[in-house]
Structures are given as C-alpha cells and as structure tokens.
Image: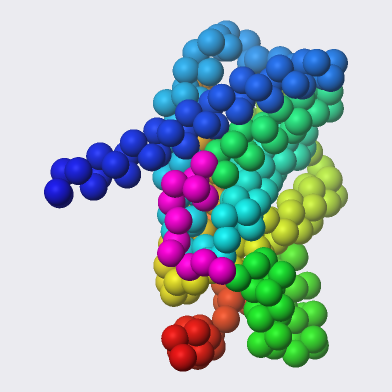
Amino acid sequence: MRIKQPLIYFGKLLLCSLAFILGAVIGGMVAMLLGLQQPPMPEGVDSSFVFLLLLLESPVMALALALVARGLGGRLLPRALTLSFFTWVAYTLNTVIESLTFTTTTVAGAMFTTVSFLVPSIFCGTAVALLFPSGEKGKSLTAAAKEFFDHRTVGAWVWRIVVAAVAFVPIYLFFGSLVAPITAEYFQQGTYGLRQPGQDEILIVLLVRSALFLLACLPIVVIWQRSKRNLFLSLGFALFVLVGFLYMLGAYYMPLAVRVPHTLEILADSFTHAGLLIVLLAKSNSQTIQTLEARAM
C-alpha cells in the first residue's frame, strides 16, 4: 500500500505532463496555421533537444500545479480555469513580456509563443484539476467570490488590491539588485541575446507583470480551502517553478554564473510575492474556521 500510493501519484503527474506536451504540439500547429513566426533559437541550440528538455521538465510543472489544485475548492470547471489561466500567465505570458524586455526576442516570435502555449496551459490545467481533486465540491466560482469579498469592506479591498497590484515591483527590484553585480555584465555585453533596458522601460514592464500576477493568483486565493501556510508553500513553489525554475533548467547553453543567481533570485521573488499577496488578500484563520463550521452545521 505504501508503494502503491506514490506510484499512483507519479502516474497522475505523468498523465498531466503528457497533456501539456500534447497541447504544446497542437498549440504549435495552431500558431503555424495562423501564420505566426516562430521565435529563433539561440545560436548552437538544437530545437529537438529543447523539446526533449520540455518533456523531461513537464512533470515538475505538473507537481507544482497539483500542490495548488489539492487546496482549491469548488467544481471542476472553475478549478480547471483557475489552474489553466495561472499556468498561461505565469509560465508563458509573463516570460514573453520579460523576454521582450531583456532579450532581443522579436514581437512576431513572442506572439507565436503566447498563442501556442495557451493550448498546453488549458490541457495541463484541466488534467491537473481532474486528477488531483481537493474534496471540496458544490460551490460555484461566483458564489465563492461573493463570500470571499464580503468579508471586508469596500475601502479595505481598494487599498489592498492597489498594493497587491504593484507588490511585485519592489520585490523584483530588491532581489534583482542583489544579483545584478554578478550577472549585469552579460546583459551589458549582449551575451546570449540578452540586453540591458532602461530604468523607465523596466519599471513599466514590472507594473504590467505585477498586475498580471495579481490577476492569475487572485482566483487561487479566492477558492483556497486549506491553511494560509499551505497556500504560501504551494503558491510560492508554483510561482518559482513556472516563472523561472523550468526556464533556468532549460537554458543549458548559459553559464552557471547566470543561471544559479537568477534561480535564487526567482526563488526569493516567488515566495516573498506569494507571502505578501496572502497577507493582503487571504481570509484570516478565524474567518476560514467560521466558514468551515458554518458548512458543517
């Protein structure tokens, strides 16, 4: 029995990762049918090897999403939509915006990535929602949202949402400044297609990314059914994996002097950002207990 359960769990992760790979293939075909231009590969990088890395890394993505999925209450559809949107924003849209800022990636290639990875995000998010249920059923997303937002006044929500919408900016700037002395020369020299944008451009992009992160994470916070500690660990890990860890693993052509500091930076960014969003937006433990007691009655 002890062996069977982990094997079943691992098998589910493989099914979710296969759903992502299948979606990536279909998404690529859709993008090509739409006439979108594929982004160029870095010099010396084999596209078939990149796809192999994507195949090997996809179970890690599935694991990160599964940890989130186990805490999401409600029916299958809102859980699937929540996970799919979170995956697409954190893994794809966020990276496309950052790539346009810090690399020489063209807008045409960025559109291909944005469109093609929408399909695997939906496939994987739906598979995870289906194979990793939370046990909490019955409430629609609308009802859950009403209950969630009713526990604070309008004034309290306004300042919390505003702060949450820009929270990623100071977090990114702070941890980025810690690794900049190590990695700045690669951006300044344009190595591996990297580039150093101006401060005004960085600030605008960070504000956009911060707002997108809020949109992606808020539905998770709204329908979350477990403790805030569990939410912190699950959401922080998911952000870390989707926003940067998988990309740093796949960027084998870059030196460790770039990959390791940026991986640590993204780790710190992700958990700090998740913690701040939870402090600002999540229900207090007493409110969560009262809700569960009301349901039991």
Q: Position of residue 276 (x, y in %)?
A: 59, 70
At 50% from the left and 48% from the top, the residue drawn is 130
Residue 241 appears anywhere in the view: no
Residue at point 52% right, 41% down? 127
Q: In the rendered view, would you say 146 is above or below 234?
A: below
How many labels were placed on the picture?
0
Indicate yes or no whether the magenta region holds residue 132. yes
Does residue 265 sit above or below 182 in this rendering? Answer: below
123 and 231: which one is in front? Answer: 123
Residue at x 67% of width, y 56% of height: 216
Toward which corner of the image does residue 188 lie, by quadrant?
Answer: top right
| Of 227 and 124, the residue lying toward us | 124
| Residue 29 seen | yes
For residue 195, side relative to residue 47 (left or right):
right
Q: Is residue 207 magenta?
A: no
Q: Residue 134 at x, y = what percent?
A: 45, 61
Q: Colour scheme used in the picture? A: rainbow
Whether residue 241 is situated above or below residue 229 in the rendered picture? above
Residue 120: image quadrant is top right
Q: In the picture shown, does residue 11 fall above or below 217?
A: above
Left or right placement of residue 33 versus residue 16 in this view: right
Q: Position of residue 252 (x, y in %)?
A: 48, 22
Question: Is residue 46 rendered to the left or right of residue 141?
Answer: left
Residue at the spot 52% in from the left edge and 63% down from the top edge: 72
Residue 180 screen position, x and y as percent:
60, 44
From the viewer's perspective, is 196 left or right of 15?
A: right
What span is colored magenta in the figure?
127-138
